[in-house]
Amino acid sequence: MIHFTNLSFTYPGAEQPALDNVNLDVPAGDFALLVGPSGAGKSTLLRCLNGLTPHFSGGLITGEVRVAGLDPVAASPAGMSTHVGFVFQDPEAQFVLDRVEDEIAFALENAAMAPQEMRIRVEETLDLLDLAHLRDRPLTDLSGGEKQRVAIAAALALRPPILVLDEPTSQLDPKSAEDVLTALVRLNADLGLTIVLAEHRLERVLPFVDTLLYLPAQGAVLSGDPRDVLAQTALGPPLIRLGKAKGWTPLPLTIKEGLRFVRAEERSLGTAETAVEERSFGATELTVQNVEGGYGRNAVLKGVSLTLRGGEVTALMGRNGAGKTTLLRSIAGLTRPARGHILLNGEEITQKPVAEICRRIGYLPQNPDNLLFAETVGEELDITLRNHGLHPGQGGAPPVEPMALLTRLGLARKADAYPRDLSIGERQRAALAALLVTKPEVLLLDEPTRGLDYAAKDALTALLRGWRDEGLAIMVVTHDVELAAQLADRVIIMSQGEIIADGPPAQVMGASPLFAPQVARLYPDTGWLTVEDVLGAENQK
Amino acid sequence: MTRRLLSASIYVMTSLMGVAAFLYPFWLPAVAAQNNVGLAHAGDAPLVLTLLAGCAFAVLLLEVQDVAANAKVVALLGVLVAINSVLRFAEVAIPGPGGFSPIFLLIVLTGYVFGGRMGFLMGALTLFVSGIITGSAGPWLPYQMFTAGWMGMSAVLCRPLVRLLGGEGKWTEVALLALFAGIWGLLYGAVMNIWFWPYLTASDGGGPGLYWSPGMSIAMTLRRFGAFYLATSLLWDLMRFGGNVALMLVAGMPVLRVLHRFRRRFIFVYRPAPTPTEESRPVATAAYRKAAA
Amino acid sequence: MSERLFIHPLAWLIWLLAAVAVLTVTRNPIYLGLTLLWVGLTYAIVKRFWRESAGAPIFSPLAFALFVILVSTIFNGLTVHVGRLTLFTLPPSIPLLGGKVTGEALLYGALNGAALAGLFVAFAVVSRVVGVRALIRLAPRAYYAAAVVASIAVTYVPATRRHFEQVREAQAIRGHAMTSTRSWLPLALPLLIGGLERALQLAEAMMARGFAGTPEEETPLYPRLLALAGLAAILAGWLLRLVWQQALPGGTLMLAGGVMLAIALRETGRRHPHTVYRPDAWTPTGLLVGLAALLTLLLFFLPVPGLSRESIYYYPYYQSLWPDFNLWLGLATWGLLAPAAALIFDVMRNEE
């Protein structure tokens, strides 16, 4: 169905090719998963499938692509639209109309399909993605997962035999992401649709994948059976990494398969003594006392109290709408609580101006792009300093040397780059730099790992650990259980505006089926949360 | 060549017709008096002229629309119009200085950076969409669309002037654009007055002493219009002038930088090998050199 | 399916056109008064009974109407010094304003204001009942590209407003405060940059779904030529009528120009093959509303044999203060009442 022969592609003006001599094959009806580090060219590769590369961007393409027997470069994206459906990352940025049904019909209208036939097509497509009950709804009312399902429906309206998706879940929370991935698995199984999916969340889809394509930053593309490819690469969810470390063959792809190996293991039943480190807390103390409030009339927070201390990373978890983001916004002063107090080192900050609060409390919102608008990364730092009157030009003294901060964030060489041209991980770090240049005592992050690949996640984890050890109080709102397992010293779970659990990760997460990381599911009642925990315990033995 | 000639004649013809239709209260009386036109014909003149302006708009829109031939330009214009409409909400919501509106900045700069045809679409569609969704649509809407379209279209005329003044990126570029936006702010106000002027001054000819009734000189009509304008609109229009100038001086340069940065990605149209495009040629040679090495 | 009243948007536009045309052309207090009454009644009924409001006007039409009538009355009264019914006299030394202030001038000013106010109310009616989407759908196929642009804009307005909120907060947390005009930049630039990035993604999505424009150089010339010729013919025909008093040849030429324009639009439209999913349907009521408005328009503007149209024009200064009245023209204004009647009828039927 899909053949690449010696395909190379260079963007206009680029020195290095974005794709270098790629060869791969995907048979018809396969579920193919494309993985690899950010910046390796996954998006470029996917866009070769319908001619968006090079028709959209320009550039030089050599070698051969065959998709459904056609050459996409010659056929152009419009010509390929009946053969390849394409779904993009951002659910907000791919709609022309604002009603579910109309949006699905848009491609059919453009194809000048007869009205009766169009009615049937739209009905079928609605059913295919279980959207019939939403048909009349405006798209703005839908959740992210529902929007992505509409985008899939819209892409499938022309009945292409191939569906290509470029990280369709990177902007979604886990529940929505699961909805989307489940829908894909069903489309592949029930209709025999050939699917090519680029995705960071391997856990959910790996068991259904026929072909795994690994696109490294450098070197040849690996493709084939998932187990074979995973064995040759470093990436993968904890289950895979553990399986490889322990030499389990065939490599388990699901917890169920993993448990078989675990049960077969000779294991001393002794309780796991995960070393409880005594850490010294810093001087900072942020206290939230009985905070109530939220948007408009309906209170999102119903009496929340907690204390964050310097030198501690707290993970705040819970369902969508549990009030996590509202809590962060309340602390930062963006939402004023209706009742209750927030104290920083004993000083009431509840009614202070946002600028004053945020000089001492850094808050990284979900989409860091909204912070960045200057011409260079360095200028972004200057703007924050100037906002607070700390810029040397204003006679102030920056609490942190900007260049030193950028070096620490790995952005030293990007100080003169245009922020929007950076990779997503770099943009996030640039936004962090723009916040941390005032040397806040508390750092709050909202879903910082959304859309990041494994390498960028590890880099972020290392950075946050470093700051914690220097006495910063950090709170991370996240759905990412593996991140919480790796990073947090303390986990808080919220539900319906209240804190329902608060304690060390092993205790809180190990006990909860919803928030347990993969390792905790493999080794229940041990308190182990990460691959390192398991291997460390084994080495001790 | 033929195409360019045709385009040029469409621009000239529609614009002349538009101007004539907008300005008829000043010339129609003289023509009517000379020919001793009776009540009936002069009476439906406003209606016929509105229709004429409408036809001119339709033909002009058809011509400029060619620029929106690919998905990129369509998407770009759609999103820019949306941004401008959101700015219009800010204008409607803030009961500040009367005539000031932040929407003209993007209209002028779109025309200046992306060309006159996109400028026209940007102006006309901004007023259409924002007028309707903010609930400020009224009988003035067609006139607003036409005038704002012209504003965007004519912005391209700044290009040769800017080149004359020392080129892009200099302060003169922004100063010129600011002056341009300011003047259009005044013109826009004047046109908005002219559309209802005939209503205000009666539209059926007849006896003497009326503003544009037959037998009245253009000078007299202008004098009265001037008085009306001074009394009712000048203050608003001066605020629009000042607002446009200030906004362009403050935001012109950074917004221009952003638009230029994105310009190539939107305007680019892929043409496959063997004739490499301007953009891909240097890359191609670099790649070949690499292959040869 | 609930049987709710549906009036095709085009019927509403014909209604608007008829109202605008009548209000523009007549100053006869009787016709003007009747038309204003029907338009005002329609507004009141639509405001009360129409199921959803597409867009409410930003200020109350009633207040605006009163304001316009007041301004117009004062302006006309102070600047026109003609008429028999002198109320008082301003010193002639004041430029423009000096002279006698007459009842006729005040009356005429009020009539002008009333016509303007009527226009405003008629537009307010239509903007309540016809949403922006319906208007875009009405665009002729030749304007497909412009219609898609407008459609995208409408779709992205709510998203852009949300985005603006996010940007405002993101800047607030890095200490941004509104201190001067320059302070708008940190809010406007991320909005613009984010918007442009979104536009690129949207363009990709549209291309992937088969939206392909036609390359510019491939559009044929002749429809464009025809459009230009049609425009010229309309202009020439009108001048012929106005300047050289050639009513019939002028009218014919204008008609021919109109037909040429229509053909040009049709030909351009054929180059964008495109169908409509669930187009708006013409219901009998909608048809009736459209036809009634059309009838008003025709009676007022076409030379109907046996119908004297002189009474449309009214001029109080030297003629009789009492307006002429033609019963047929008076009845013709009733065509504008059709949508209001249909609505009331529908409400009454549903209550049974």
Image (cartoon, coloured by chain):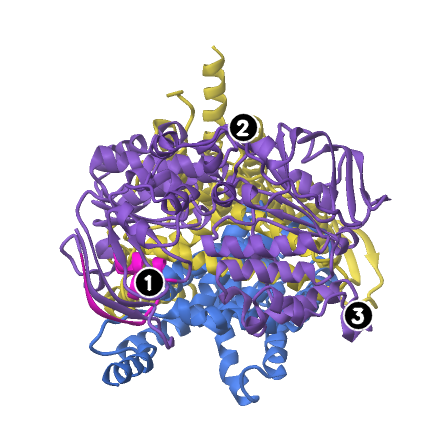
* Amino acid type, callout 1: Ala
Q: Does C173 appear above or below A159?
A: below
Circle 3 crowding by C-alpha within 10 Å: few under 14, some 14–19, many from 20: some
Separation (CA) of disc 2 from disc 3:
48 Å
Q: Residue at 22%, 54% (x, y): give it.
A: A80
Q: Which chain is yellow?
A: C
Q: Helix or strand or loop: what does disc 1 sit on?
A: loop
The residue under label 3 is A397
Disc 2 + disc 3, Cβ < 8 Å:
no
Tell me, what hue is chain A? purple
Drawn side of residue C342 relative to residue C263, left or right: right
- Marked residue chain, label 1: B
Q: Quadrant of residue B1?
A: bottom left
Which amino acid, mark 2?
Ser
The residue pinned by badge 2 equals A512
- Chain on which label 3 sits: A
Q: Is residue A294 left or right of residue A235?
A: right
Looking at the picture, do discs 2 and 1 lie on one chain?
Answer: no
Residue tagged 1: B69
Q: In this picture, which residue range is highlighted in magenta?
A: A40-66
- Shown colour of chain B: blue
Q: Residues within 10 Å of mark 2 (few under 14, many from 20)?
A: few
Task: Name the quadrant of the N terminus of chain C.
Answer: top left
Q: Earlier in the sequence, mark 2 or mark 3?
A: 3
| Front one among A475 and A158 | A475
Q: How many marks?
A: 3
Q: Is residue A367 magenta?
A: no
In the rendered view, would you say C193 is above or below C123?
A: below
Q: Chain of mark 2?
A: A
